[in-house]
Image (spheres, rainbow, N blue to C red):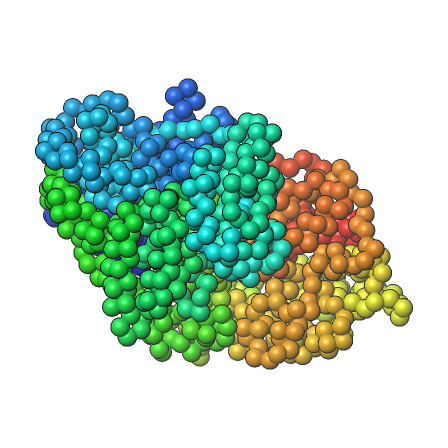
Amino acid sequence: MYSTDASLYRVVPQVVVRPHDADEVAAVLDACRETGTPLTSRGAGTSIAGNAIGTGVVLDFLRHMNRVHDVDAESRTARVDPGAVHAVVQRAAAPLGLRYGPDPSTHTRCTVAGMIANNACGNRALGYGRAADNVAGLDVLTAAGERLTLRRGERTASPTLDRLEQVVGADLGTVRTELGRFGRQVSGYSLEHLLPERGFDVASFMAGTEGTLGVFLGATIDLVDEPPHRHMVLLAYPTMAEAADDVPALLPFEPVACEGLGARIVQVYRAAKGASAVPDMPEGGGYLYVEIAGHDETELADRAARIEQASSARAARYVTSRAEQAVLWRIREEGAGLASRVWDRPALAGWEDAAVPPERLGAYLRDFERLMDDHQVQGEPFGHFGDGCVHVRITFPLDEVGGRSVYRSFLQDAAALVASHGGSLSGEHGDGRARSELLPAMYSPKAIRLFEQVKGVLDPDDVLNPGVLVRPAPFDDDLRGSGRGHAPPLRRTGLRLLHDDGDLGQAVHRCTGVGKCLADNRGTNGVMCPSFQATRNEKDSTRGRARTLQEMVDGRLVDQGWRSPEVHEALDLCLSCKGCLHDCPTGVDMASYKTEVLHQTYAGRVRPRSHYVMGKLPLWARLGAPFARLTNVLLRTPGVAHLARWVSGIDQRRSIPAFAAKPFTRHARTRPAAARPRVLLWSDSFTEYFAPAGGHAAVEVLEAAGYDVELLDRSACCGLTWITTGQLDAARRILGRTVEVLHEYVAAGVPVVGLEPSCLAALRSDAVELVDDPRAAQVALGVFTLSELLTRTEGWNPPDLTGTEVVVQPHCHQSSVLGFEADLAVLERAGVTVTRLSGCCGLAGNWGVEKGHYETSVAVAETQLLPAVRAAGPDAVVLADGFSCRTQLDDLVDVQAVHLSQLLSGGSVHD
């Protein structure tokens, strides 16, 4: 997991240390210095240049040294630990009307010290400056063990800094002519901060040194006012180069941000999230997001009009809605992940963030397009056009014969091209392993020697991040593959993996390390990644699991294939929530990968007890339903219940849900009406045998909406419990039969409505992965949630529930597969006051009841669900369509949540 970051590189460390305080950091550095072991600092591991990985000790600051110590409104500064996350700093500053200016697209998880180390910038650096411009102070540990307290405007007494001043002072001409030529010149050491006329500002100089000159122990950062109004002018152009041509004409209007975005990236986002997820955007091949901010909305509107008039855009939109702007920014922020999925083969980092003076940007982009054509690679530019910084993911053929030669040739030519436009190889990510070897393309031999001399003063033994910036390793060493061509024995899969050509290697290598799964998802309506939210352990994140699986399919560190203990440890706490399928920009589907691993691991072998019981729950429920009363009595008998849990592999602290007195379809009363449109209410196993109230309520609601409700007289199971336990052969048979049954209705134009989100999601997504039958895809398109059908039913109106407070816990599979927009529309039309929760309830079907998962299950629930329920008023309704979600609430806080059908029926139907 620590062998990679978000770059193309793979370097295996000897040791990973998660320090608790500065003294532990110092002790580790002392040991490294004495033994000659390299030391690399790491925040969230979102580096795209390979500067957060190393061969020796990796210091992970994210785990423990992550506090925001104080926010000072008077000085407008914040004092933070190195592992403090950008988004956490913003939340701490917001109540005071302040914010930290730089905001990379990874702001939900990147750390402040990591930002400073790379001199990160982000979308709004145009208005607020780079990380270097916002450093008020740094606490630094030098390679020699000297602790330096650096403050802007103050001189720190230190023999080491005296020697540094002498080295730089001996060649001021080189510094003045080659460094600091334009705002995004991030490559190399920013020695311009050490000029006498700049006050020998060592704190700002340390920004962008990439952990090669010192270890950051803490920082004091500047904060800026958060303006009350932000508006956006969305400009559309025929091409990205034409968008770039307009940038110089727009900068005089003092935008806070001026971002470029290729139309292909928008198309990928629309395809992944659905057309409704993308706001109205003018037609074009490329876009500029021009953000303006201030206190006077009238002035902003006037400025927006002048921006539109000054531009040469073919079309424009003025966007003032914060919600709509947030969606547009989300598309831009996920650009790195989305850009990797534009073409018919993976697009990779490598030439990621070059920058040129903004007035050269249009010409540079045209030359860059020709360069890609010459090398027969493809990429879609986006990035911080107002600063002249261009991001791009490129289809480097690294896994093909001669592919690495193509990579080397392209980067050398690209470096020469940037230098010819007076640019910088890096505009914000740093040079790292990706570009350090190329620094001579933009710097003279004298400047390169000066970099080496500076390194010699602060790290004479080359302990700190060796091979980066000074005496660099070749940029094509240590490249990791993209998953194609590896481990052929692992390619035959139980799932079809349709989006990855049936290749598990290609599937798990979707993860590029951008680390969105590490983000705090509160308030985002996201799900990913529940276990990491609870444990804060990298191995429990989607990225950590993907990295482990990559090692498995590549046959390197994890070399025992499907049965590797490392694989099962990494996957153990995966809840199969499918949150990553929706939330991950690169479309990782860890639930499917876990299913595949379990399928392969236990093929022909004895399985865990829970697989035989919980994994075949619909079968046992069908057999036990006729004896429901007796079964419930027995399961309430302490000794019998204890034995039943042991046999089933269920944690003894869990309750066992009671059987309904009568199965839903045997007890339901429908009123056939030939003149009405037909609808099939499909009964899943949970509604049928355990929670029929939602089914009875759904019959009432659908009939009131004007439908002739039909129920199946035969079994049609989704096979979900077999899928989650990796029993794919059985699941395929079960789903095949269900597809055959439901297709009769779908083919006749009869909508099929399901009530249990996880079961309906299995029909929407898992069926096509398991059943090689065109009818599976047709059924996937013909099944609906209750809210989806109601919102498209002409003339239907919900009951008036004005004044009702509803706390909503969407089922994970609602958020990730089915979508929750229709549910929100129904609730809005009903007039309820909605508090929508992000994240997962923590039960996740059989996972949360299995022995060994109880503590994590509860911890997941405590991240968002349980605090929200406790904080809700006594009259609030807790809405949870998922049987798991309702069971978790009943188990942990004795709250009886209801299904949407029960809310709409007036709550008159009970189990």
Task: Give percent across and percent down for residue 646.
Answer: 51, 62
Give the side of residue 861 with respect to residue 112, left or right: right
Kindly tell me whether residue 631 is visible in this rendering.
no
- Residue 633 pos. (x, y %): 68, 59
Q: Nearer the viewer, residue 52 or 834?
A: 52
Q: Could you tell whether 356 is left or right of 860 in the image?
A: left
Number of numbered discs overlaid on the protein picture: 0
Q: Residue at x 51, y 47 (%)?
A: 312
- Name the residue rendered at 23%, 39% in the picture: 179
Q: Position of residue 881 (x, y in %)?
A: 66, 54
Relative height, residue 176 to residue 264 (above, below): above
Which quadrant of the view contains residue 369?
A: bottom left
Question: Relative to 172, is 239 above or below?
Answer: below
Q: Quadrant of the N terminus?
A: bottom left
Q: Can you name the residue that lies furthest to the top here?
A: 74
Q: Residue at x 87, y 66 (%)?
A: 676
Residue at x 32% of width, y 56% of height:
351
